[in-house]
Image: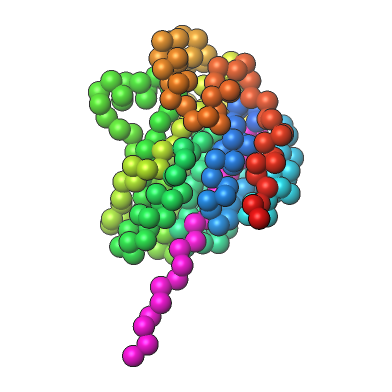
Amino acid sequence: MALRMSKPLTLAAFTATKNALSRGCCLLECAVAVIHDVDSWVWLDGFSTDGTWELIQKMAAANPKIRAGQAAWQPSSPDGEAIGAAHQMAANRCRGNVAWEIQSDEVYGPGAAGALREAFADPAVNSACVVFKTLWRWDRLMLEKGWTAWRVRAARTGRGCRVPHDASNMGIVPRVTKVAGAVCWNTGFAFTGHADTKTKQNADLHASPHVIYPWETHPKNFHKRDPETAAVRQHELPELIQPLYGASRYEPDLSRLDALKART
């Protein structure tokens, strides 16, 4: 009797963006961190007007793994469905048997993709949680309590995987596995001191800013408010994002496009 061979695991990342540059999202560092460890990566832009789309096109030209496209974001209700729906559209375009949600302000530490591949080598695993490290006050409180923040960011495709309305977790049950080797640094507004107002945030995202970013616990210029914690965290940051921490705004370093180029 012939042995039934399982399909090789293909890891497909996906990202949805809209005016990400004006919000301080470090797109290039996000991509460089894992581009050589995924099989493909969908970048779906919501018709940005701040240069985000043009940068994504340059990224796609540098590496054929990146599949760039555009699709309109839906108007959002106060529950902020627009961001979740946009990520779902990107997820639907993935060509792989494992989909990995990576938001444009997230930079993974070394070895993350390998850890996810190892976890999904077990066919019983449906979804995977990554270690989630934010650069905000909320994460400091988590650390003080000795807790680890986890978010479901990878799941098998074809098994009913969905992205929720706020895009904070994704996946399916049963069998959600914690992958300690996949560490995600969520930069958010930690790099930027230009501080988008709530009005501008709402205009950019067509969603309620207090839902997408809890402003009460994610204050502007947090790195200046708490220099002791900022110094500790800067020491812990992946090398890719250390130079950005505390900058007044995010300016993409286009020389990093060379690091995106396909390896021969």
Q: Count every numbered label the image shows and give the total.
A: 0
- Residue 84: image location, x then y, percent: 50, 44
Q: Is residue 97 something that shows in the picture? A: yes
* Residue 50 sits above or below residue 199 on the image: below
The quarter holding residue 199 reads top right
Q: Is residue 87 magenta?
A: no
- Compared across the picture, whether 128 is left or right of 235 comes to left
Which of 167 and 97 lies nearest the eye of the viewer? 97
Q: Is residue 12 magenta?
A: yes
Q: Is residue 86 something that shows in the picture? A: no
- The residue that appears at 58% across and 23% down in the rendered structure is 244
- The residue that appears at 60% across and 32% down in the rendered structure is 26
* Residue 102 sits above or below residue 192 on the image: below
- The residue that appears at 32% across and 21% down in the rendered structure is 141
Which of 162 and 203 lies nearest the eye of the viewer? 162
Classified by dominant secondary structure, the portion drawn in magenta counts as loop
Residue range in magenta is 1-20
The quarter holding residue 56 reads top right
- Residue 145: image location, x then y, percent: 25, 23
Quadrant (top left/top right/bottom left/bottom right) for the C terminus: bottom right
- Residue 18: image location, x then y, percent: 63, 38
- Compared across the picture, whether 139 is left or right of 17 comes to left
- Compared across the picture, whether 204 is left or right of 219 comes to right
Quadrant (top left/top right/bottom left/bottom right) for the N terminus: bottom left
- The residue that appears at 44% across and 44% down in the rendered structure is 111
